[in-house]
Amino acid sequence: MSDLEKLVRRRMQEECAKGASAEEIAKVVRDLFNSIDLSGSSPDAVAVRATPNYE
């Protein structure tokens, strides 16, 4: 499983644990993908940039 898949799964699990609706989870995942800059060379940089603060 790639780092991106792990990140998406973790964010989805966090939102489910908070009781978020399917629409809210979809928005979080969509925002996550929209925030990723694939031009970087480091997978860690992708994970850091792709973790917005929703709290």
Image (tube, rainbow, N blue to C red):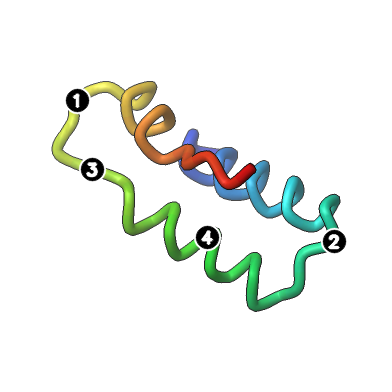
Point out the image quarter for the C terminus: top right
Circle nearer the viewer, 4 or 2:
2
Q: Which mark is residue 37?
A: 3
The residue indicated by pointer 1 is 41
Q: Amino acid at mark 2?
A: Gly
The structure residue drawn at horizontal position 41% and vertical position 28%, both measured from the top left corner, is 48
- Secondary structure category for the residue under label 4: helix
The answer for how far apart the CA atoms under marks 1 and 4 are is: 22 Å
Q: Secondary structure at mark 3?
A: loop
In the rendered structure, find residue 12 and report the number of the disc placed on it. Answer: none
Name the residue carrying label 4: 29
Q: Nearer the viewer, residue 3 or 50?
A: 50
Labels 2 and 3: the sequence-earlier one: 2
Amino acid type of the residue that numbered disc 1 sits on in the rendered structure: Ser
Q: Which residue is mark 2?
A: 19
As measured in the structure, the alpha-carbon distance from the residue carrying label 3 to the one carrying label 4 is 15 Å
Q: Nearer the viewer, mark 2 or mark 3?
A: 2
Residue 6 % position (x, y): 59, 39
Q: Relative to 7, is 14 on the left or the right?
A: right
Report the mark closest to the observer, 1 or 3. 3
First in residue order: circle 3 vs circle 4: 4
Q: Nearer the viewer, residue 6 or 51?
A: 51
Amino acid type at circle 4 is Val
Q: CA distance from mark 4 to mark 2?
A: 15 Å
